[in-house]
Image (spheres, helix red, strand yellow):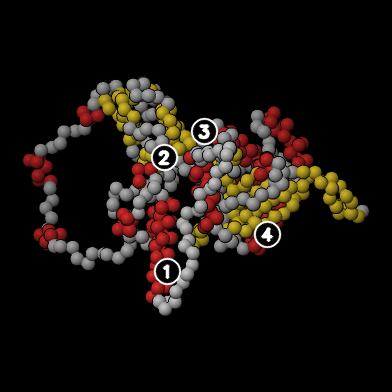
Amino acid sequence: MAEYKLLLPSMGEGVMEATIISWMFNEGDFIKEDESVVEIATDKVDSDVPTPVSGKIVKILKQKDEVAKIGEAIAILETEGGSQDSETPEPKSYDEVKDQIVQPEPEVVKTLEQPLSNHNTDHSFSNQNSDLYLSPLVKSIVQEEKISDSELQSIKGSGLEGRITKEDILAFVKNRSSKSESGSVKESESSVKFETAPKSSNPQPLQLNSGDEIIQMDRVRKIIADAMVNSKQTSPHVTSFIETDVTNVVTWRNANKNSYQKRDGEKLTFMPIFIRAVVKAIQDFPMINVSVDGDKIIKKKNINIGMATALPDGNLIVPVIKNADQLSLSGLAKAINDLAYRARNKKLTPADTQGATYTISNVGTFGNLMGTPIIPQPQVAILAVGAIVKKPAVIETEFGDVIAIRQKMFMSHSYDHRVVDGSLGGMFLKHVNDYLENWDLNTEI
């Protein structure tokens, strides 16, 4: 019998750890190759981890709600075959390898034996302490704020196993800056006394009344809450609105949805049409398809459209349609239906939720006319489409103006005012509007 360590596999770019949600087997159970053994959760998506070998679970190393790093052992299996150690070659003796040892030059030895000089003592971040784990987001804040290793050691982490969270590091930066400002005020304005009320860092606790119920946020809701607050703190949001006549779109879909479903076995929703219009507008205004990195603008080559999807539990997830500009209407419909189905059935992989460069949210599915969506970082814009309703409208014809019943829809475009001005954000929205209003009734799918 051999011992096999089941490692937490890579979950995609930027994902460094995962939380154990539940084990599907217990210690002592036998599992088959490629069988899902454990359900895990990252800040992107929930997914199952299969085993690459068959064997018996001898020990579970990471229990429910514990966090494991990528590449870390989460369980030990007992598999058939020889011991792993038996596959390792016996180490050679010193006599066998001594002739292969290269002796360093005397000058090199002398240099290495000298005491270190010019040791860097400034407040730069090195994170040489291997015991201190920092997430990519926390690490970027540390580097940007030039927090030294000694300062990091002084921060008491509130995360699992004492890890430093984003809130911990932001609170430290805030307190450090406030202390600095306080010190400078005392030096420059020592003759002036300020009498201000103390500013509490924590909000006042809510007063509970009889019958009030306390509901603990689940893991996904906490992630969503953090992401929304972070986006508002990062991007100055501006939202533009437009009312769009989508009569041609509705007419075309009604004429094609039944034949398309019979032919391809797929439902034809409005979303492929909306995405097609957005892709064309991005091609007209590529500076919408960007991200911000400090004082640099990263112009994205690929057009990857995120699609905000409501889950049965009330939470939200955003699967991504990669290279949407390279897909036909039929290809978009298939991709949308596949991602929506897997999202609602917890079948998405981490890769399915990564890499979006622009996002669409269909608030019309909830009967809402419009909304002011929050930008998913690090994107710089998001479009919300409202419910399609029939309205009387004035139509210009060759015989004069007439009033007719039209299919109307509001669209709202939120954008990051650091890099997207009102002219760009507004013209982009107008182009999406024009592509939808002028939809060709002879479009093939």
Marks 1/3 in contact by CB < 8 Å: the verdict is no
Marks 1/2 in contact by CB < 8 Å: the verdict is no
Residue closest to the eye, 219 or 20 = 219
- Give the residue at mark 2: 18
- Say which element carries label 4: helix
Crowd rating for badge 1 (residues with CA inside 10 Å; few <14, some 14–19, many 20+): few
- Give the residue at mark 4: 427
- Rounded to the nearest angstrom, the CA distance separating label 1 from label 2 is 39 Å
**Residue at 77% across / 36% down in the picture?**
255
Residue closest to the eye, 431 or 429 = 429
Crowd rating for badge 2 (residues with CA inside 10 Å; few <14, some 14–19, many 20+): many
- Say which element carries label 1: helix
Q: Earlier in the sequence, mark 2 or mark 3?
A: 2
- Rounded to the nearest angstrom, the CA distance separating label 2 from label 3 is 16 Å
- Rounded to the nearest angstrom, the CA distance separating label 1 from label 3 is 50 Å
* Camera sees residue 144: no
Q: Earlier in the sequence, mark 1 or mark 2?
A: 2
Split into 4 quadrants, where in the image is the N terminus?
top left
Residue 430 falls in which quadrant of the image?
bottom right
Split into 4 quadrants, where in the image is the C terminus?
top right
- Give the residue at mark 3: 347
The amino acid at mark 2 is Ala
The amino acid at mark 1 is Glu
Residue closest to the eye, 321 or 41 = 41
